[in-house]
Image (cartoon, rainbow, N blue to C red):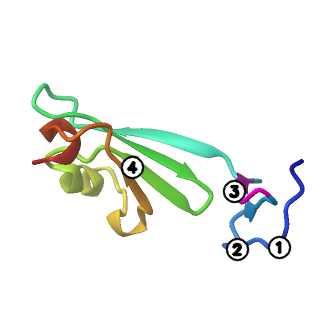
């Protein structure tokens, strides 16, 4: 179990395992909370691992939060919503 097949697809340490899962190597994973820290704004999470960037929830003003905190929206690869409320979707 755990031997990887094929070559590193992205050059950033992500390898496809024999069972189809991906394993990340060599670079640390980070977690950032994107928030204005006011009562009228819900937080968003940015998880970065190798070349992948995953965002959990994109509330109202999310793009502004990204600009203020230096996060490049174009580099986000996945958006996950915890529910369909305005706090998660920005609608």
Mark pair 1, 3: CA separation: 12 Å
Mark pair 3, 2: CA separation: 10 Å
Q: Which mark, residue 55?
A: 4
Q: Residue furthest top?
A: 39
Asked if residue 80 lies in the magenta stretch, the reply is no
Question: On the rendered structure, is 14 left or right of 78?
Answer: right
Callout 2: SS? loop
Which is nearer the N-term, disc 1 or disc 4?
A: 1
Query: For residue 12, what is the image quadrant?
Result: bottom right
Depicted 84 relative to depicted 63: above or below: above
Q: Where is residue 69 in the image (x, y as percent from the top left)?
A: 32, 50
Q: Circles 2 and 1: CB distance less than 8 Å?
A: yes
Question: On the rendered structure, is 5 left or right of 28?
Answer: right
Which residue is labeled 1 in the image? 6
* Magenta residue span: 19-24
Question: On the rendered structure, is 8 left or right of 46?
Answer: right
Question: Is the residue marked by circle 1 packed among few (<14), some (14-19), or many (20+) residues within 10 Å?
Answer: few
Which residue is labeled 2 in the image? 9
Q: Position of residue 36 (x, y in %)?
A: 21, 36
Q: Circles 2 and 4: CB distance less than 8 Å?
A: no
Depicted 39 relative to depicted 30: above or below: above
Which is nearer the N-term, disc 2 or disc 4?
A: 2
Q: Position of residue 85 (x, y in %)?
A: 16, 37
Name the mark nearer the viewer: 2 or 1: 1
Which is nearer the N-term, disc 3 or disc 4?
A: 3
Which residue is labeled 3 in the image? 22
């Amino acid at each position: 179990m755990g031997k990887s097949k094929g070559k590193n697809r992205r050059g950033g340490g992500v390898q496809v395992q024999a069972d189809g899962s991906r394993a990340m190597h060599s670079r640390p994973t980070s977690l950032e909370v994107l928030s204005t820290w006011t009562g009228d704004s819900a937080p968003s999470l940015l998880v970065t691992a190798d070349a992948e960037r995953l965002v959990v929830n994109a509330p109202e003003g999310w793009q502004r939060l990204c600009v203020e905190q230096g996060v490049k929206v174009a580099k986000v690869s996945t958006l996950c919503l915890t529910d369909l409320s305005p706090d998660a979707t920005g609608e």
